[in-house]
């Protein structure tokens, strides 16, 4: 995903992330139509923000911050969001902000739940920049309806598993195969990595969102599985566990959690913000957690910290 220009690496770096914000609306063969070829390539990020959830809210605000932070670090990006008109418009807006940081950005609108599109997305980045270095695996949707576990509908369960678990697992699988097929770096930098975004619900039960809790717990397991598989290749695999982050996904519960935070639910005393996530993601992608394998970082202001 990202590498700071302070590394002064002579080769280009490429990373991937998932929250669906990319632009191949012109077709894969025309992926370069939105690139500024006069930009000197530095560290590159292939970012597939995959929060494609059909008729549900996406987390585009959430991960726009990650895209911008990575762009500031000198990473070229492939960003992805749902193919509907509203999401594509937001995707292009994010692209323009990232381009202003002096990097290259490809937009690839697509439903990441469609596994047949994964190779096309990876091709778009690899064909443009020659290699891949980092995947930010952030596919995510909320539940169809909050409620009693005993009333959970199969369609909401299936959609959560399809987007929150199945899509990131198989995208990471395809990405891993490409990393292993590339020449291995002679040194630990440029860092190669996969970053899974789960949730504190991987360890704290959300009783009114059972399907989400199950899906994100599975993502946490997937992160550890890929970490164990890829560690001897010096590929870092990490897990980010966001807590209460103020985004479009949390709008329905804002008033409820405002009151709880005021009463001390979050020891830090405030909501989390996209910038809190972005700084951690960038550090992971830049290789600042070298020799760390399969670890989860809870970005939650102490919410998940056991206490009396």
Image (tube, helix red, strand yellow):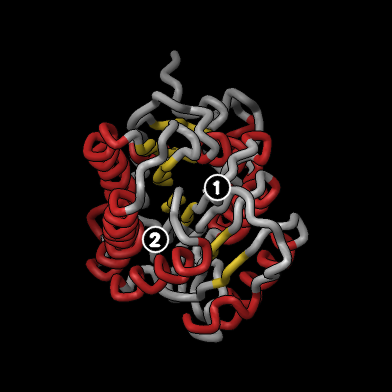
Q: Mark 2 vs mark 1: which is more N-terminal? A: 1
69, 190: nearer the viewer: 190
Left or right, residue 228 beside residue 277: left
Read off the residue under disc 2: 143
Residue located 32% across and 74% down the image: 114
Residue located 38% across and 74% down the image: 120
Q: Position of residue 20 (x, y in %)?
A: 50, 66
Judged from this view, the residue extending furthest toward the bottom is: 26
Q: Dot 2: what SS?
A: loop
Q: Quadrant of residue 143?
A: bottom left
Q: Position of residue 76 (x, y in %)?
A: 60, 57
Judged from this view, the residue extending furthest toward the right is: 100
Left or right, residue 51 beside residue 219: right
Q: Position of residue 135 (x, y in %)?
A: 43, 51
The answer for how far apart the CA atoms under marks 2 and 1 are is 42 Å
Q: Position of residue 201 (x, y in %)?
A: 38, 41
Q: Is residue 211 visible?
A: no
Q: Quadrant of the C terminus?
A: top left
Give the vertical position of 208 relative to 29 (above or below): above
| Label number found at residue 229 | none
Read off the residue under disc 1: 11
Q: Is residue 98 visible?
A: yes
Q: Dot 1: what SS?
A: loop
How many residues crowd mark 1 within 10 Å: few (<14), some (14–19), many (20+)?
few
């Amino acid at each position: 995903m990202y590498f700071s220009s302070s590394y002064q690496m002579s080769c280009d770096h490429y990373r991937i992330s998932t929250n669906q914000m990319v632009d191949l609306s012109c077709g894969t063969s025309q992926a370069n139509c939105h690139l500024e070829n006069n930009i000197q390539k530095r560290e590159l990020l292939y970012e597939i923000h995959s929060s494609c959830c059909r008729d549900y809210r996406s987390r585009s605000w959430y991960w726009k911050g990650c895209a911008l932070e990575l762009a500031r670090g000198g990473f070229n990006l492939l960003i992805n969001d749902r193919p509907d008109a509203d999401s594509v418009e937001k995707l292009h807006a994010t692209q323009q902000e990232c381009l202003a940081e002096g990097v290259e950005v490809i937009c690839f609108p697509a439903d990441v739940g469609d596994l047949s599109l994964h190779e096309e997305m990876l091709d778009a980045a690899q064909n443009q920049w020659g290699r891949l270095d980092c995947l930010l695996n952030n596919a995510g949707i909320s539940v169809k309806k909050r409620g009693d576990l005993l009333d959970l509908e199969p369609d909401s369960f299936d959609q959560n598993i399809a987007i929150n678990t199945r899509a990131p697992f198989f995208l990471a699988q395809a990405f891993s195969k490409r990393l292993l097929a590339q020449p291995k770096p002679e040194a630990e930098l440029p860092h190669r990595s996969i970053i899974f975004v789960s949730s504190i619900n991987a360890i704290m039960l959300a009783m009114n969102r059972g399907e989400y809790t199950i899906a994100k717990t599975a993502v946490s397991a997937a992160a550890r599985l890929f970490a164990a598989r890829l560690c001897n290749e010096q590929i870092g695999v990490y897990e980010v566990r966001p807590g209460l982050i103020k985004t479009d996904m949390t709008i329905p519960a804002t008033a409820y959690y405002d009151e709880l935070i005021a009463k001390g639910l979050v020891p830090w005393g405030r909501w989390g913000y996209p910038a809190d996530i972005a700084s951690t993601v960038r550090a992971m992608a830049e290789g600042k957690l070298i020799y760390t394998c399969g670890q989860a970082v809870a970005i939650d202001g102490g919410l998940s910290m056991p206490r009396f």
